[in-house]
Amino acid sequence: MAELNHRARNWLVGWWRLIHLGALILVLALSPSSYARDNRRSLARHIYLNTAPNLLGFTLMCALITVVITRIVIVTALSYGLSQYALQVVIRVLVLELIPLTAAMFVALRCAIASGVELSLLRQRGELQAMQQRGLDPVRQEVLPRVTAGIFATITLAALSCVVALVMAYLASYGFTLSGVAVYTRLFGQVFNPDVTLIFVLKTLFFSLAVSLIPMASALYDTAELRFRASAELRMLVRMFAVILIIEVVSLVGNYY
């Protein structure tokens, strides 16, 4: 019973620290002092490293997947006499659901987790404590640029890939002609009504917050020894996937119920 209480307490403390870090990052992000010259340089560097190297590859991957899925859906719909619903299915499945989720997971695996490891190494070497002793805020100097870069990368990849997916879905359906623009635009408007658009924007934003904040919170507050590091990273991944799953389920309920 004591061990169960200890685990429950650690679980609650972990979530509380995550919420506290998120609130602290929000306050720092709204503070003009966080954008001094040195901080702006660090912020720009992290944004560039998280976004630019991944932009082309992720966009091409989404374009290829869009063409393949669009052809599969169109051919299947034609065989069942449901061709009028094919593009709506493509838009809903790809743009509304898969691309934001894929962008979040891509940023988490390529950027956010690596940034968390870097921050954890800084803490283990005592560099964060040394910054505090010099009168600097390590959260402002090291955590805020990494979190902001993760959020920016997720939103940018998701937004650009959605546009590319819409263009590729049109080309796969109508070819290089403008004859289907009016029909395609009407279908897009039927899917992305104001409620669905709001849910889409909020889902992408919360995805970006989850994949950016959770690795940083684990790096800052996890006190596990090096031999237990794998277990700590596994808990971080489980927490991240749980939050992403909850966000996705809530968005599905909002869109379809």
Image: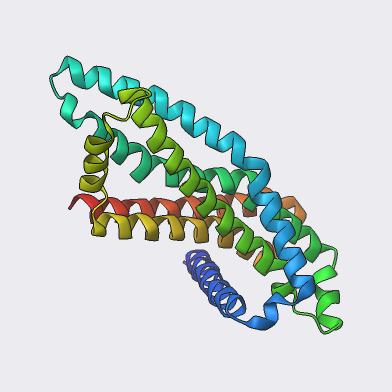
Q: Residue at x 26, y 22 (%)?
A: 74
Placement of 49 over or under 141, stated as above or below: above
The total number of labels drawn is 0
Q: Residue 133, how many percent across, how many down? A: 85, 82
In the displayed image of the protein, which residue is found farthest to the top? 79
Residue occupying the point 54% across, 55% down: 211
Left or right, 213 with reference to 202: right
x then y, percent, for residue 255: 24, 52
Whether residue 229 is visible? no
Q: 202 or 56, which lies in front?
A: 56
Q: Is residue 36 above or below residue 207?
A: below
Q: Residue at x 84, y 69 (%)?
A: 127
Q: Position of residue 145 (x, y in %)?
A: 68, 65
Picture layout, residue 200 above or below residue 6: above
Q: Nearer the viewer, residue 211 or 46?
A: 46
Quarter of the image where one finds residue 43: bottom right
In front: 204, or 120? 204
Question: Which residue is at a point 58% across and 48% down the rendered structure image?
Answer: 108
Where residue 129 sits in the image (x, y, percent)?
Answer: 81, 75
